[in-house]
Amino acid sequence: MRTFRHVHIPAGLALVLALAAAGCGQDGQGAGAGAVLPDPVGRWSVESLTTGGRTLHAPETARLDIAENQAKGNYGCNGFTAALSFAGTSAVTVTPGATTTVACADMEFETAFAKLFTGRLTIDRGPDRLTLKTADGSTIAMTSEPSVPDAPLTTVEWTVQSLISGASVSSLPAGAAGTARFTIAADLSVSGTLGCNRFSAQVTRDGDRLTFGPLTTTRMACDGPAGEVEQKLTDLFASGPLVSRTEGRRLTLTAADGEGLIAETPSDAE
C-alpha cells in the first residue's frame, strides 16, 4: 500500500492558491480577462506615430473613422479615404483612396501618417485605445473619440471645404478658403455666398436628394480662385438633384455625374 505524506502548507500560501483557483474557475477568466476591449470600428483620435526610432505627436485634427469596410479621416490637415479588409479583429489591410491636396504648413506628420496607413497592419487593442502596427514595427497610436451627433441639414451655416470630381477630392485653392458658405433655412430657402457673389434660392427635398431652384445672385465681377470656385458651385447647384449625406459636422452634396462638394459646420451646431 502506498503511503501519502502530509505536506504542511503555510496559511499565507494557502490563501494565494485559493484565490488563484477561484479566478481560474470563473469560466477560465483570470484577472483582466474580463476587460472590455473596443471594436476597431469607431471614431479614433490619433495621438502619435512611432517610426524610424522617432515619435511624432499628432495635431489635434488628426483622426480616423473606421467603418466595416472603409475608413476616412484627417492626416492633420488633409482629409483622406481608404478601403479596409479585416482579418477578424487582429489585422486589417488598408488600400488608400482619395485625399485632399492642401499645401499644409507642417507636412512631416501628414507624410508619415500616409506612409504608415497602408498595406497590412496588425491591431493591438486596449480599453479605449487602438494601436495599428506595420510589419517593421512602426505604430499609429489612437484613443477612442466620443461620437459626434450629426448636425442638422437646416438652420446651420455650412462652409465649403472641398470640391469633389469623381474619385478625387480637392480643397479650395488658396485665396478661396472659407469664402463659399450657405445656410438652408427650415422652409428650405437657401442663402449665402458662392465665393464672391451672394446668392439665394429655394430647395426642394425628396429623401436624401436636394434640388436647387434658379439662383438669384449679386453681379460682382469675380476672377481668380474665388471666381473659379463660384463657377463650379453655380454649375453644381444647377445640375439637378444632389444626394446629401450628413456625418457629424460634415455635409456632402454629390451630383449624378460625380461632381460635388464637402462642407462643414462649427462644432457648436445644434
Image (cartoon, rainbow, N blue to C red):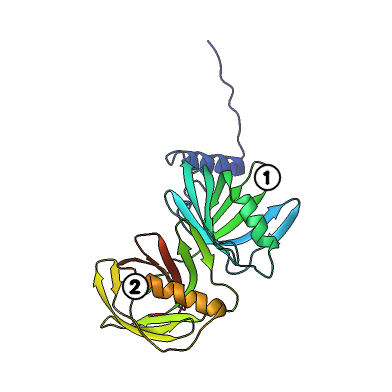
Q: Nearer the viewer, mark 2 or mark 1?
A: 2
Identity, as a three-letter code, of the amino acid under mark 1 = Gly
Q: Which residue is mark 2?
A: 238
Residue 141 or residue 168, whichever sits in front: 168
Nearest the eye: 39 or 138: 138
Point out residue 108 in the picture as x, y percentages from the top left corner: 70, 61
Q: Position of residue 42 (x, y in %)?
A: 45, 57
Circle nearer the N terminus (2, 1)? 1
Q: Position of residue 134 (x, y in %)?
A: 63, 45
Which amino acid type is marked by label 2? Ala
Question: Please, what secondary structure does the residue beneath circle 2 have?
Answer: loop
Q: Residue furthest top?
A: 1
Q: Which quadrant of the view contains residue 182?
A: bottom left
Residue 137, numbered label = 1
Regarding residue 156, the answer to whether it shows in the image is no
Q: Relative to 24, does residue 109 appear above or below in the rendering?
A: below
The quarter holding residue 261 reads bottom left
Residue 155, horizontal then vertical, whole percent = 34, 82
Residue in front for this viewpoint, 218 or 92: 218
| Residue at horizontal 55 percent and vertical 56 percent from the top | 129
49 vs 171, left or right, is: right
Q: Quadrant of the rendered structure where residue 208 is?
A: bottom left
Mark 1 Cα within 10 Å, few/some/many (few <14, many 20+)? few
Q: Is residue 42 visible?
A: yes
Looking at the figure, which quarter contains the C terminus? bottom left
Residue 166 higher or lower than 162, as above or below: above
Packing grade of label 2 (10 A; few <14, some 14-19, many >=20) is some
**Secondary structure at numbered mark 1:** loop
Relative to the observer, which residue lies in front, 77 or 4? Answer: 77
Mark 2–mark 1 Cα distance, whole angstroms, equals 51 Å
Outermost residue on the front side: it is 221
